[in-house]
Image (tube, rainbow, N blue to C red):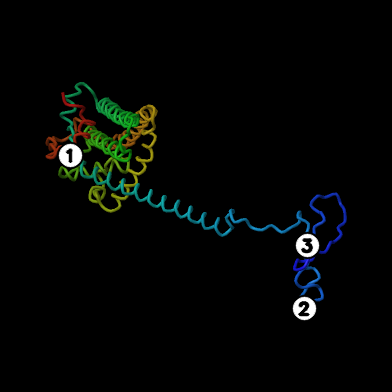
Amino acid sequence: MAGSTPFRKRRFRKTGDPAETQVALPAPETGPEAPGGSASAGIAVPSGTAPAVPSATEPDEGSRQRSGARRMQAVRNGVRKGGESVRDAAQYVTDRIIENAPRVPVRDLAALRAQFPGLGPDQLADKLISGAATATSTVGAGIGAAAMLPVPPAMPAELAAEITSVAAIELKLIAELHEVYGQRPPGTLRERSFAYLTAWTEERGVDLTKPTTLNVALGGQMKRELRQQIMKRMIRSLPNVLPFMVGAAVGAVMNRRDTRKLAEKVRGDLRRRAVAWDALRTLPPLERPVQPLPEATRVALEGPRT
């Protein structure tokens, strides 16, 4: 037909492979004889061995790498923000505990002996430790129960409230153990409170024979140690917010255990340096805090008002 492109037939070897079929290819514009032509230009390529052509729907390697890099950057940003939020929360709790320390009411030895008549130092210390462990256990159970609410409260705020309340209970316990074993630190209410705070941070009794331990209270190192202690407490308290009342049981058990462990460490230090009650010089009554504690912390210490 005039004007149509001529076709040439080529013979193919029969191999039984359907991929190798006889195909009529159009004659190239330039034959082998033409300038710039190639003898291989018209050779048929079996479909089974044709080179793969990238599909427009499949992402290429560069796109996958860019997507992976974006995801990795998002993970890094999340970790950085999470670390910053944990540090911010620890700093907030640290400030609240320092602020509350001089406001914690402490009973002196005379008041304790009047409240628990007939008990010796170790028996009285056992009573104090048992009462503090029960109080911190109640706080832990309350935080765990809050996780069962249909709309749980902000968990970081709940953890901060728990740690602040537990710290107040344990500070009161440490101060009264120092009274029981005749180891009241010298100084004003504020100075003693910070000495007890150092004892709580380092989990040991105040050594009255080393004045440097009293003078460095609230120094930079002490604040760093306090933040580290609070971050450890926050991590240990995370199971307290588990749902289905599991958190309540876990929080109660863990707080009771941690308070007893701390108390035994402090009591071990104080017992080695204890002064017998008969040999104690008369000490003035302890000052009462001027500012009351926040209501939630006060309830954790004293229970609800009747």
Disc 3 target residue: 25
Tell me which numbered mark, 1 or 3, is placed earlier along the sequence.
Answer: 3
Residue at position x 20%, y 44% in the image = 99
Residue 302, image quadrant: top left
Evaluate if marks 1 and 3 touch, with contact meaning CB atoms under 8 Å apart.
Answer: no
Q: CA distance from mark 3 to mark 2?
A: 20 Å
Counting from the top left corner in percent of width and height, residue 245 is at: 37, 27
Residue at position x 31%, y 47% in the image = 227
Residue at position x 44%, y 52% in the image = 74
Q: What amino acid is at disc 1?
A: Arg
Disc 1 target residue: 103
Residue 148, image quadrant: top left
Which dot marks residue 23? none
Q: What amino acid is at disc 3?
A: Leu
Q: Secondary structure at mark 2?
A: loop
Furthest toward the top, the residue is: 118
Q: Residues within 10 Å of mark 1 (few under 14, many from 20)?
A: many
User: Nearest the camera: 144 or 61?
Assistant: 61
Q: What amino acid is at disc 2?
A: Pro
Counting from the top left corner in percent of width and height, residue 303 is at: 21, 27
